[in-house]
Image (cartoon, rainbow, N blue to C red):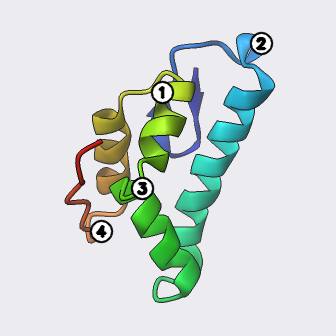
Amino acid sequence: MKLAHDVSYKSEASTFSGERLLAVAIEQQAMRDLEAHPESEIAQSARRFFKNLSGDLSFFCDLIEVDIDHAQAQIMKRYPDLDLCRQAS
């Protein structure tokens, strides 16, 4: 199944649990936050999320069965100016 922003998921929507749907929604909202106001605290928070500084991105990627490196590559493809020098996951 493909969702917004060219992020691929292994499972079909009909088999997504409530947790998975919430995780997808959180990741999609973080992507929208990067676009809304690039210099805002909200966008800075989204950058920290996608850099995986606190391990949150790893957690959500595991939950929805997406490789974190693939997810970050897709983010970099959409936002080439975003520096994602990722911390250890």
Which element is circle 1 on? Answer: helix
Contact between labelled residues 1 and 3, with CB atoms less than 8 Å apart:
no
Which element is circle 3 on? Answer: loop
Q: Residue at x 59, y 13 (%)?
A: 11
Q: Nearer the viewer, mark 3 or mark 1?
A: 3
Where does label 4 land, which residue?
82
Q: Position of residue 19 (x, y in %)?
A: 73, 29
Q: Residue at x 41, y 67 (%)?
A: 47
Cα–Cα span, label 4 and label 3: 18 Å
Where does label 2 land, which residue?
14
Where does label 3 land, which residue?
54
Height in image: 9 above or below 55? above
Q: Amino acid at mark 2?
A: Ser
The mark nearer the N terminus, 3 or 1, is 3
Q: Amino acid at mark 1?
A: Asp
The mark nearer the N terminus, 4 or 3, is 3
Where does label 1 land, which residue?
62
The mark nearer the N terminus, 2 or 4, is 2
